[in-house]
Image (cartoon, rainbow, N blue to C red):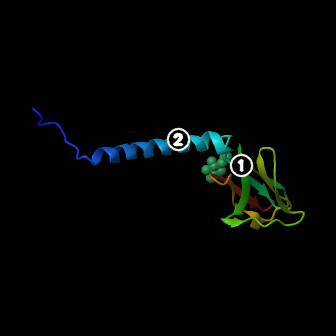
Amino acid sequence: AHRNTIYLPATAAPIYLLALVCFRTSRLGEAGTEHGSSPRHTDLNLDEPMNNITTTLGQTAELHCRVSGNPPPTVRWLKNDAPVVQEPRRISFRATNYGSRLRIRNLDTTDTGYFQCVATNGKKTVSTTGVLFVKFGTS
Ligand SMILES: *[C@@H]1O[C@H](CO)[C@@H](O)[C@H](O)[C@H]1NC(C)=O
């Protein structure tokens, strides 16, 4: 009659109860973090892929990094995987209401490359890459 009954040793029940209590405690811990210490939901979005530009020597190019999030993300610019070095009155980037903008004036053919913006909020990172191609004047 009792062939299918599993007899637990006397010590098994307290261990089972302890495990159950730990499980419930950790679940409460997660909920507490979500609704307690960080009141607002954090997020990070890439709103649009970066634009590509084909232009000629001496022109001005603007690359746009369209990202948003809460808290507002920090944006870095890379050219061919190395940080973009700003040059006074020629190469600059700044934060905008849509994310960040990189502007290069008086373009040279050596400005040609893959430009990437990397946005992070500390927890998550998104990036997008655009191609800038600077040709000699005959278009
Ligand atoms: C830019 O060029 C790359 C490679 O040619 C392409 O994959 C991408 O879709 C282009 N981006 C836009 C916004 O047109």
Which residue appears farthest toward the left when viewing the image? 1
Residue 112 is situated, as x and y percent measured from the top left of the image, at 73, 62
Q: Residue furthest right?
A: 89
Q: Taking 60 as reference, is 67 above or below it? A: above
Q: Residue at x 25, y 46 (%)?
A: 10
Front-lying residue, 15 or 112: 15
State the SS at label 2: helix
Residue tagged 1: 51
Furthest-top residue in view?
A: 1
Q: Position of residue 37 (x, y in %)?
A: 66, 45
Between residues 1 and 128, which one lies in front from this camera angle? 1
Which residue is pictured at 60% across the width and 44% down the height?
33
Is the residue indicated by label 2 positioned so its CB lies within 8 Å of ligand 1?
no
Residue named by callout 2: 28
Image quadrant where residue 113 sits:
bottom right
Which residue occupies 70% across, 62% down?
Answer: 78
Q: Is residue 93 above or below residue 19?
A: below
Q: Nearer the viewer, residue 39 or 59?
A: 39
Closer mark to the observer between disc 2 and disc 1 = 2
Disc 1 secondary structure class? loop
Q: Give amino acid for label 2.
A: Leu
Task: Work out whether residue 54 can be spotted.
Answer: yes
- Label 1 near ligand 1 (CB < 8 Å): yes
Q: Is residue 43 visible?
A: no
